[in-house]
Amino acid sequence: MNHPIPEAVTGIVGAIGGILGLMIGLEKSFRLRFKAQTCLCMLQTEINTRPSHPQAPSGKV
C-alpha cells in the first residue's frame, strides 16, 4: 500500500531540517566572519600603535 501521509510527513520533516540547517550555517558563518574582522582590526591597531623606530636601551638600571 502506498500511503500519502508518511510521504508528506517525510517531506515536511526534511524541509524543516533543511531550514534549520540553513539557519545554523548562516549563524556560524556570521560568527566566523565577525571573529576574522575582529582579528584584522586588532592587528591593524597593533600596527598603527607600534613605534616607527625601536627605542634603544637606555642603560639605566
Image (tube, grey):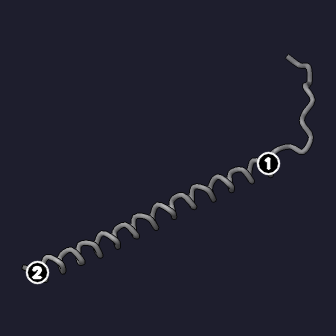
Percent position (x, y) of residue 8? Answer: 18, 80
| Residue at position x 92%, y 40% in the image | 53
Label disc, if present, on residue 38 of the rendered structure? none
Locate the N terminus and report the quarter of the image it occupies.
bottom left
Q: CA distance from mark 1 to mark 2?
A: 72 Å
Q: Nearer the viewer, residue 44 or 24?
A: 24
Locate the C terminus and report the quarter of the image it occupies.
top right
Percent position (x, y) of residue 52? Answer: 90, 45
Q: Amino acid at mark 2?
A: Asn
Left or right, 40 with reference to 3: right
Left or right, 51 with reference to 34: right
Q: Amino acid at mark 1?
A: Thr
Q: In the picture, residue 11 is in which quadrant?
A: bottom left
Q: In the picture, residue 60 is in which quadrant?
A: top right
The answer to whether residue 54 is above or below residue 10 is: above
Q: Nearer the viewer, residue 15 or 30?
A: 15
Element under disc 2: loop
For disc 1, the marked residue is 49
Element under disc 1: helix
Left or right, 13 with reference to 5: right
Q: Earlier in the sequence, mark 1 or mark 2?
A: 2
Label disc, if present, on residue 2 of the rendered structure? 2
Percent position (x, y) of residue 41? Answer: 68, 56
| Residue at position x 21%, y 74% in the image | 10
